[in-house]
């Protein structure tokens, strides 16, 4: 992303939220780390590297149900595709 576009977005957020640049950058860093952490947890769960109970505590039932649903849908699509091969 172009630095001028990023700066424009930061100024817009500062204006809307009435927060300092430092506070917004700290918040963005925290949210970004949390998102990356959740993505890493999900990856580890799908690779069976962490137990279901651990990810359930971290991301909650609703999010875990969505992950399981998506995995099952992909597995069905793969099975369907292999039948026609």
Image (cartoon, rainbow, N blue to C red):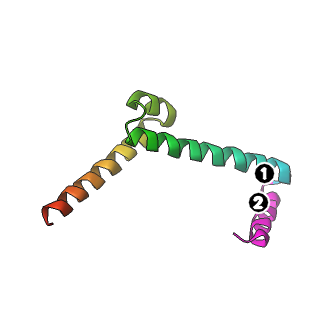
**Image location of residue 82, percent across then percent down:** 18, 61
Asked if one can make out residue 31 in the rendered structure from this viewpoint, the answer is: yes
Q: Is residue 80 above or below residue 51?
A: below
Q: Name which residue lies at 71% across and 50% down.
A: 28
Q: Name which residue lies at 79% across and 72% down.
A: 4
Asked if one can make out residue 19 in the rendered structure from this viewpoint, the answer is: no
**Image location of residue 14, percent across then percent down:** 81, 58
Q: As drawn, is 34 to the left or to the right of 73?
A: right
Nearest the viewer among 5 and 40 is: 40
The region drawn magenta spans 1-17
**Image location of residue 49, percent across then percent down:** 41, 35
Neighbour class for label 2 at 10 Å: few (<14), some, many (≥20)? Answer: some
Q: As drawn, is 81 to the left or to the right of 59?
A: left
Label drawn at residue 59: none
- Between marks 2 and 1, how big is the CA–CA gap? 8 Å
- Of helix, strand and loop, which mostly describes the magenta segment? helix
The mark lying in front, picked from 2 and 1, is 1
Nearest the viewer among 77 and 10 is: 77
Magenta stretch encompasses residue 52 = no
Q: Tell me the SS state at disc 2.
A: helix
Label drawn at residue 13: 2
Q: As drawn, is 36 to the left or to the right of 73?
A: right
Q: Name which residue lies at 71% across and 47% down.
A: 29
Nearest the viewer among 51 and 69 is: 51
First reached walking from the N terminus: tag 2 or tag 1: 2
Q: Is residue 20 above or below residue 11?
A: above
Q: Which residue is mark 1?
A: 24
Neighbour class for label 1 at 10 Å: few (<14), some, many (≥20)? Answer: some
Q: Tell me the SS state at disc 1.
A: helix
Q: Name which residue lies at 33% across and 49% down.
A: 71
């Amino acid at each position: 992303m172009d630095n001028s576009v990023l700066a424009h977005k930061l100024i817009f957020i500062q204006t809307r939220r009435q927060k300092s640049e430092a506070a917004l950058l700290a918040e963005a860093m925290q949210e970004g780390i949390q998102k990356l952490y959740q993505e890493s947890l999900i990856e580890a769960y799908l690779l069976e590297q962490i137990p279901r109970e651990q990810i359930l505590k971290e991301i909650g039932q609703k999010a875990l149900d969505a992950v399981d649903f998506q995995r099952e849908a992909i597995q069905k699509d793969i099975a369907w595709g292999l039948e026609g091969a």
